[in-house]
Image: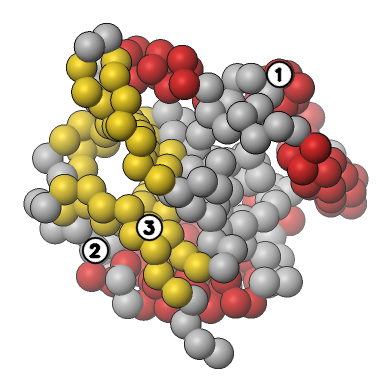
Amino acid sequence: MTSLLISDLHLQEERPDITRAFLHFLQTKAAQAEALYILGDFFEAWIGDDGMSTYQRSIADALRSLADRGVRIYLMHGNRDFLLGERFCRMAGCALLADPSVTTLAGESVLLMHGDSLCTRDQAYMRLRRWLRNPVSLFVLRHLPLSVRRRLASRLRNESHAQTRMKPADIVDVTPEEVQRALRAAGLRTLIHGHTHRPAEHRLDVDGTPARRLVLGDWEARGWFIEADAGGLRLLPFPFPFD
């Protein structure tokens, strides 16, 4: 059977083209799969399960329809939607996946990550990430009033966009040594991640052994997915459906 992996859709009501592409993907390609893995930044922003909008509930309903057809769905936190919780997952019929996680794809054990933790040269972001993912910080964030969380999310998004444009390309990409460390620690030779919006397959060497890193693309002008079956792992683009 086939497993599919996607990442960095950044779903939001203001981008109906991406939403249409995703719903089309669920009804066609994903409906024929055994499992769907969503490796973070599924939504552009998530302020908490208690703040779900009508739009976000409709996305949960679409995932639930897929799950009800027998497709297993796994969802990993990204840097935009790390407050996604169990309530959403129950509604959507999916399971939260730790970052990093190991799964079997195409007969091979594979390391899955969102990818932001690999960007260790971006020291300012790594400091912010450590603060945001601290259990105490998460507890405080989840208990702030919704209005405060909305303002904070908007501020963080705006600052992130501005800083990313200003930083050198190599700073906001993964650190090669960190990729090797992650593969070495997991004892694996294949890593799949998103986050960087730079879809590609990279060949590398880990302690004298061939390894590879597959990077999922973001859904901006077209969609990207990895298809895993008996034939191996393939990184594939597809055009957004016509209106």
Using the rendered view, name the quadrant where residue 202 is placed: top left
State how far apart marks 2 and 3 are (Cα): 12 Å
Amino acid of disc 1: Gln
Say which label, 3 or 1, has the lower sequence index: 1
**CA distance separating discs 2 and 1:** 39 Å
Residue 129 in picture, x, y percent from top left: 68, 26
In this image, 112 relative to 146: left or right? left
| Image quarter hosting the C terminus | bottom right
- Point out residue 146 in the picture as x, y percentages from the top left corner: 84, 50
Q: Mark 2 or 3 closer to N-term?
A: 2
Q: Where is residue 194 in the image (x, y as percent from the top left)?
A: 48, 43
Circle 1 — which element? helix
Circle 2 — which element? loop
Residue under the image location 60 percent in, 77 percent down: 17
**As drawn, 224 above or below 129:** below
Is 27 on the left or on the right of 138, as rendered?
left
- Against 144, residue 177 (above or below) is above
At label 2, the amino acid type is Ala
Residue under numbered circle 1: 123
Quickly name the residue at label 3: 225
Residue at image location 58% in from the left, 26% down from the top: 119
Q: Which residue position is annotated with label 2? A: 33
